Amino acid sequence: MSDYLDNLVDSLEVQDEMAFTQLHLAMQEALNPQISPSDYYLYYPYREDGGYLKRLVTMCQDSLTNLPSYNIVQEEAIKLARLYSSLQTYKHLTLNERELKMSNWINSHLKNYPEITEWEFAAATGSTLGIFCLYAIAFDPKMVIEKAQSIREAYFPWICGLHILLDYFIDLREDKETNQLNFVSYYESIEMIGERLHIFVENSLKKAGQLGYPKFHRAVVQGLLAMYLSDEKSMDSQIRSVTQQLLTGSGWGVKLLYWICCQLRKRKSL
């Protein structure tokens, strides 16, 4: 659903805030089985999808009814979906209004996240990993609200932020050449990129180690590093030094997964 919505707001000549906001209600309503789907295309000029988006929503809603503890995690999951929806709405507006709208939205939340910058906050909102993890833990019939909150706090902003910052990191040159929005480009220097990514790695691993099943959550962090840094774009001359620093300083688990990802890429399996 997130990929499909991204295509809708990115691929066609539409830059309408109301249309994007309405479309992304689908992300939030998919996480709320108590409500009926809205008219997601109400303000969007193209609406003949054969019922595809509505079916995605209802399939998600139906799957939630089988989770014994979804009522425990629902509020946290919808919080993340709202943030994701807001980012996708604002980042696809016209260039002359996008940055101001995003900045105003981010700063209304940033007081709760004093350790990160506004564009790091925006990056964190762009990951759905936190939602997926909350879905997974809702299979536990003994889940309690404190555990759900600790998952959300570990994943947002740290693990989610690392996810999207790495994605933008390897696309830095390409996005500059094509004049695309890139949150990593807001750092003042390559040295600062390395410093901030290192902080996100450290905090992600620390937070992961404090959760239940810490090996699983650490593997998520290590896997993100291995997957993105094994991409050939990470060896671009502009950012190669940061890639090497991250690989050197992130431990043997990352190096092992990095080697595996490199082998998979050679076979074109990744």
Image: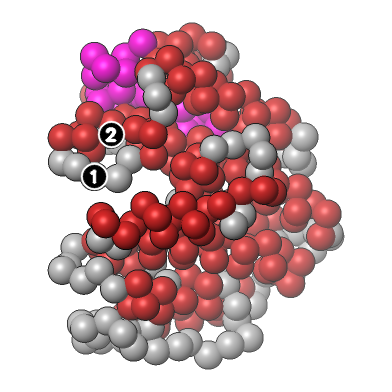
Residue 145: numbered disc: none
Using the image, determine if residue 36 lies above or below residue 53: below
Looking at the picture, which amino acid does disc 1 mark?
Answer: Gln
- Location of the C terminus by quadrant is top left
Instruction: Inspect the image, locate mark 2, and give the three-letter code of the amino acid beneath it.
Output: Asp
- What residue appears at the point 83 percent right and 59 percent down from the top-left corner? 144
Q: Which residue is mark 2?
A: 171
Residue 265 seen in render: no
Position of 269 compared to 58: left or right?
A: left
* Residue 83 is at least partly visible in this image: yes
Q: Nearer the viewer, residue 157 or 262?
A: 157
Is disc 2 placed on a helix, strand or loop? loop
| Residue 67: image location, x then y, percent | 68, 69
Does residue 148 belong to the magenta stretch? no
What residue is shown with label 1? 180
What residue is shown at x 25% (from left), y 61% (from top)?
94
Say which of marks 1 and 2 sits in front. 1
Q: Main secondary structure of the magenta part?
A: helix
Dot 1 and dot 2 residues touching (CB under 8 Å):
yes
Q: What segment carries the magenta color? A: 219-241
Q: Residues within 10 Å of mark 2 (few under 14, many from 20)?
A: some
* Residue 171 placement: quadrant: top left
Q: Report x, y in % for residue 61.
A: 55, 78
Q: Quadrant of residue 264?
A: top left
Q: Secondary structure at mark 1?
A: loop
